[in-house]
Image (tube, rainbow, N blue to C red):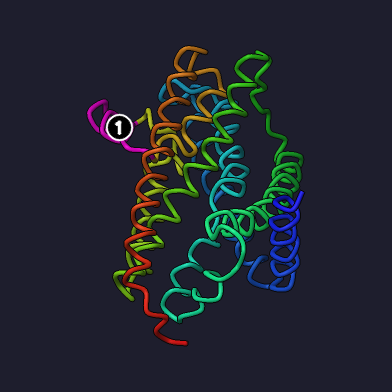
Amino acid sequence: MMLCGKYGAVFLISWQRELEYRFNFVLGRLRNIVTMLLLYFVWVSLTEKTGTFAGYSRAELITYVFGINILRSLILGTQSKQVVVDINEGMFSAYLVMPMSHVLRAFFSELAQRSISFLTAIAEVALFALLLGVTFFVQRDGLLALLFLVSLAMAVALFFALSYLISLLAFWSREALGPRFLFDWVLEFASGAYFPLDILPASVLALVKALPFAGIMYLPLQIYLGRVGPGGAVTGILLQLFWTGITSLIILVAWKRGLRRYTGEGM
């Protein structure tokens, strides 16, 4: 109960803080809406003549575009970037004396941001789907729907682990926001945030799928669309679990070594 209480309080405080900065939140959602609509009109134009493109039907591509908007809001968070700022400014010291795990504190803080964005993204998709009169692909296979939810949960954990690890570079460099920017850029491209990865050449696709990024957004949507069978879905989920485990172990090592270098500079 105490564990739930501590991190539940972190969640609620972070939720309230997110609502305080309404202008920044609105700008972030507008960016996502513009991206979603641009991708929608691109894919609609590409399927105008035949109704398909690269093996995808128009309904599947539209579902992918609108689905990405929802998954982006649920999976991709920015709160772990604050770790870089806290380390650089010395505020990290305050968290070291708190009776809670800093990793879990950062996770629940980010979860608050994600939950607000997730609810907003659902409203956005519902509104524009109604205005544009789009037809979605609906997955009716219960097993695939369940595997999609499992893969989605693993994607949330995998992204957070990778993001938190990159933020720990601040122990070694005050310019850690640079690598974070590069990480965010590569991740959005390699995770399928802009297009289904299997439209890439086979050699490039094999390389991208060997990285952990494909398991963040591409895999869950592939499972939902039924383009991956139950066996392939389980294999993909195990790969997500593998990368999350490896990243978590690296975080543990980086945390211990980073604390030896941390001086609280900037306090």
Please determine whether, in this image, residue 242 is positioned above or below residue 183. Answer: above
Tell me the residue at 60%/37% (across/down). Answer: 67
**Residue 68 location, x and y as percent?**
56, 41
Tell me the residue at 64%/52% (across/down). Answer: 111
Residue furthest to the bottom in view is: 267
Q: Report which residue position mark 1 lands on.
A: 210
Residue furthest to the left in view is: 203
User: Mark 1 is on which residue type?
Assistant: Ala
Q: Main secondary structure of the magenta part?
A: helix
Tell me the residue at 74%/67% (across/down). Answer: 19
Q: Does the magenta portion include 201?
A: yes
In the picture provided, is 246 more to the left or to the right than 70?
Answer: left
Q: Quarter of the image holding residue 241?
A: top left
**Residue 193 location, x and y as percent?**
47, 43
In the picture provided, is 112 more to the left or to the right than 194?
Answer: right
**Residue 51 location, x and y as percent?**
53, 23
Q: Which residues are magenta?
A: 200-212
Q: Does the magenta portion include 104?
A: no
In the picture provided, is 240 more to the left or to the right than 31?
Answer: left
Q: Quarter of the image holding residue 266?
A: bottom left
